[in-house]
Image (cartoon, rainbow, N blue to C red):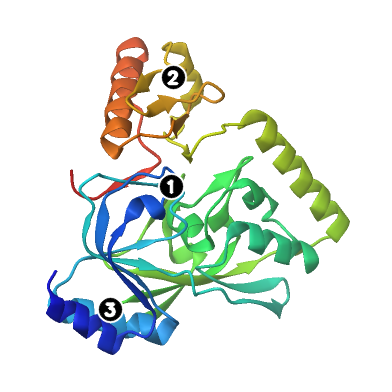
Amino acid sequence: MNDEFFAALRARVRGKILRGEPMARHTSLKVGGPADFFVTPADRDDLAALLVLLAETGTPFLVVGGGYNLLVRDGGIRGAIISLACFEEMEQLGGGKVRVGAGVTNRRLVQFMRDGGLGGLEFLCGIPGTVGGALAMNAGAHGEAVLDHVEELVTIRDGKVLQSGRDGLDYGYRFLRLAPGEIIVGATFRLEPADPDQIGARIAGYLEHRATSQKIGFPNAGSFFKNPEGAAAWRLIDGAGLRGERVGGAQVSESHANFLVNRGDATAADFLALAARIKDEVRQITGIALEEEVRIVGEE
């Protein structure tokens, strides 16, 4: 990307702009090549101005949340990365409704719900990342999923703010289908009144479960593969004898077989090669084709 585009960005966007930014700094796996531009719009108007510029110049873009479910290839990303870290509003609307910005972390949202005496999202406490990222992949745990608690999803597409009720969304296990270029900027949740102490107890229970079952100790992206219907990915990987398997600096966690970890010097290519080996071994042994839950983007 040329200096002229960079100058246009600086002239029309008020937020933070980084050039040639290594994505390893913005993903939980700590791998990934540079993004041409990493832009953090200051607010919704700033995001709209950025999107207009990107459309005018035909510049591709990708929105990232906390980087916890993302694998960026070593060649990096051409165009612009958009971070919605400044979209941090949270507001109780009454009637069990809460309006939340896409940049709010899951942990902050759960604490806000607990303090406000509203239950239903406690399962998010152990899922790292942001609300926007959780919504984009319909994150879930303990048999629950975040989109099941959404009353209204707010997105921007083609310069227009769209508000969609849950019944109008196309979503399911670990996916939400959006139109090309559509960006989640926030959501309204409808929750149930509950005693804050009971909410706190549920949160503590979920965190304890996570600490005991997912004590990983190395950078990771959470569950790397989706659970096939009627099966658990970690059991399939473990049954194939792949616990502890390693390619370069990437390893199948010895604590949880569906977590791939960075032992300190991994590259994205290491993770991709390890994932391919896992899929091949599991398919040969069980006939089941594993599918990545982690989103894989960027150039080789």
Task: Answer with left or right where residue 19 lies relative to residue 166.
Answer: left
Q: Residue furthest front?
A: 265
At 44% from the left edge and 30% from the top edge, which residue is drawn?
A: 263
Rendering quarter of residue 168: bottom left
- The residue type indicated by label 3 comes to Leu
Mark identifier at residue 237: 2
Tell which of 14 and 71 is nearer to you.
Answer: 14
Q: Give the CA distance from mark 3 to mark 2.
A: 42 Å
How would you rate the neighbour count of disc 1 (Cα within 10 Å): few for under 14, some for 14-19, many for 20 or more?
Answer: many
Task: Report which residue position mark 1 lands on.
Answer: 69
- The residue type indicated by label 1 comes to Asn
- The residue type indicated by label 2 comes to Ile
Task: Answer with left or right where residue 59 lies relative to residue 282.
Answer: left
- Where residue 52 sits in the image (x, y, percent)? 24, 83
Task: Report which residue position mark 3 lands on.
Answer: 51
- Where residue 185 sits in the image (x, y, percent)? 45, 72
Vertical position of residue 179 compared to residue 255: above or below: below
Mark 1 vs 3, N-terminal side: 3
- Where residue 200 sits in the image (x, y, percent)? 81, 53
Mark identifier at residue 232: none
Vertical position of residue 97 compared to residue 138: above or below: below
At 25% from the left edge and 81% from the top edge, which residue is drawn?
A: 9
How would you rate the neighbour count of disc 2 (Cα within 10 Å): few for under 14, some for 14-19, many for 20 or more?
Answer: many
Mark 3 vs 2, N-terminal side: 3
Residue 135 in view, yes or no: yes
Quadrant, the C terminus: top left
Tell which of 290 and 151 is nearer to you.
Answer: 290
Q: Give the CA distance from mark 1 to mark 2.
A: 19 Å
Rendering quarter of residue 54: bottom left
At 45% from the left edge and 32% from the top edge, which residue is drawn?
A: 261
Q: Give the CA distance from mark 1 to mark 3.
A: 24 Å
Which element is circle 3 on? helix
